[in-house]
Image (tube, grey):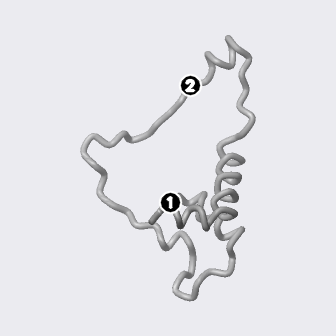
Amino acid sequence: MRSICSLLEEFLPNKPKHIDKYEDLICYVQDRPGHDLRYALDTSKINHKLGWIPKETFESGLRKTVIWYLNHQEWCQKVSE
């Protein structure tokens, strides 16, 4: 979440007056029962057997995702209704 907030600070620096930092909008809630503590992938097998290498890092993919949503806010609003 903090990574997304940092990107929003970069791309949308002019926030509404009631928002000092995007990170202040994060609301922590109690975990659901059985909540997984983390998700991890081991891509070594697909790297080794197929020579597959991801085209994006997590950071570059997240940046592109945030940009897409910012460029499609009308669509986001429509599907959220």
- Foreground tag (2 vs 1): 1
| Residue that appears at 36% across and 39% down | 36
Q: Which of the 4 image quarters holds residue 15?
A: bottom right
Type of residue at label 2? Asp
Going by the image, does 53 lie left or right of 76?
A: right
Residue receiving disc 2: 42
- Marks 2/1 in contact by CB < 8 Å: the verdict is no
| Residue that appears at 69% across and 63% down | 71
| Residue that appears at 70% across and 14% down | 50
Dot 2 falls on a residue whose secondary structure is: loop
Residue receiving disc 1: 79
Going by the image, does 2 lie left or right of 61?
A: left
Figure check: 16 above or below 81: below
Q: What is the crowding at mark 1: few (fewer than 14 residues within 10 Å), some, or many (at least 20)? A: few
Q: Position of residue 21 (x, y in %)?
A: 57, 76
Dot 1 falls on a residue whose secondary structure is: helix
